């Protein structure tokens, strides 16, 4: 199922993400600052609420969070950031959506296009792949965090739209506006999730062979390394056998 594959993809990349924690904090700090420009009270600012939830999931220090919010709310951030999404295809016809937050659209577009090209992909026009996805909040937990029934009941009671559980873990899907609330409730009950973010969930997944899967993972990691990129979503489906070889 798609959730099963998504969980494995997240676990595959998590080690590399942990090694880049300072960069992750910088990106989240930018998210907090931009969101806080619309109001410093998360109760009345869904974007800020979601950014705070993301910061807490990544164990960002409280002082860093508060400083970033003050910078945005107080008008101390001089840079004007723009939210933009890029759509394209990777090897094997895998659809890719890249969400970015940039102060220079031309620079970011050029860098994203270059990364796609170097990894056998192509950047497409707006709308070329978005119809294959649904915008949502996604929270993942390891299977050991809770029994399937307990996670299902807790997530739905907190306001989640759907819960998928399997041997590899639990995937909780929320409406974008409910993401922060559900994240906080589940964190209090089950501890830190493996991941929690607003993302694009594929309607249908695409399987590829090992060579293309390896190239696609390199594409995803290169995109995530870019300072302006917030998140990368794909409809990639990786089999257990290929995942084991990629992780070796």
Image: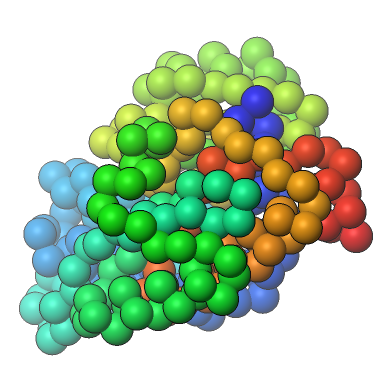
Quadrant assignment for the C terminus:
bottom right
Instruction: Return the x and y of residue 88 as percentages of the image width and height.
Output: 42, 56
Side of 197 where 146 appears, left or right? right
Instruction: Return the x and y of residue 70 as percentages of the image width and height.
Output: 20, 74
Q: Residue at x 35, y 57 (%)?
A: 124
Q: Residue at x 54, y 14 (%)?
A: 153
Asked where in the image residue 43 lies, by quadrant, the reply is top left
Quadrant assignment for the N terminus:
top right
Its colouring scheme is: rainbow
152 or 10: nearer the viewer: 10
224 or 49: nearer the viewer: 224
User: Is residue 13 depicted above or below 7 in this figure?
Assistant: below
Instruction: Return the x and y of residue 75 as percentages of the image width and height.
Output: 9, 78
- Whether residue 117 can be seen here: yes
Side of 129 where 121 appears, left or right? right
- Whether residue 49 can be seen here: no
User: Is residue 114 depicted above or below 139 in this figure?
Assistant: below
67 or 89: nearer the viewer: 89
Asked where in the image residue 207 lies, by quadrant, the reply is top right
Instruction: Return the x and y of residue 111 as percentages of the image width and height.
Output: 40, 80
């Amino acid at each position: 199922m798609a959730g099963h594959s998504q969980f494995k993809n997240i676990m595959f990349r998590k080690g590399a993400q942990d090694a880049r924690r300072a960069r992750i904090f910088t990106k989240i700090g930018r998210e907090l600052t931009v969101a806080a420009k619309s109001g410093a009270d998360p109760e009345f600012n869904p974007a800020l609420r979601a950014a705070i939830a993301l910061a807490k999931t990544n164990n960002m220090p409280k002082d860093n969070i508060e400083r970033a919010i003050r910078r945005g709310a107080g008008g101390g951030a001089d840079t004007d950031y723009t939210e933009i999404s890029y759509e394209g295809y990777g090897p094997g016809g895998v659809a890719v959506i890249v969400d970015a937050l940039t102060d220079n659209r031309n620079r970011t577009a050029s860098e994203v296009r270059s990364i796609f090209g170097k990894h056998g992909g192509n950047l497409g026009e707006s709308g070329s792949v978005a119809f294959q996805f649904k915008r949502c909040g996604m929270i993942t937990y390891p299977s050991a965090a809770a029994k399937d029934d307990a996670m299902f009941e807790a997530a739905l009671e907190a306001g989640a739209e759907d819960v998928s559980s399997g041997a590899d873990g639990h995937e909780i899907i929320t409406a974008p506006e409910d993401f922060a609330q559900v994240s906080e409730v589940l964190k209090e009950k089950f501890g830190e999730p493996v991941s929690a973010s607003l993302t694009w969930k594929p309607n249908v997944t695409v399987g590829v062979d090992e060579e293309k899967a390896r190239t696609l993972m390199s594409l995803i990691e290169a995109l995530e390394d870019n300072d302006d990129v917030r998140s990368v979503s794909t409809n990639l489906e990786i089999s257990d056998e290929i995942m084991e070889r990629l992780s070796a």
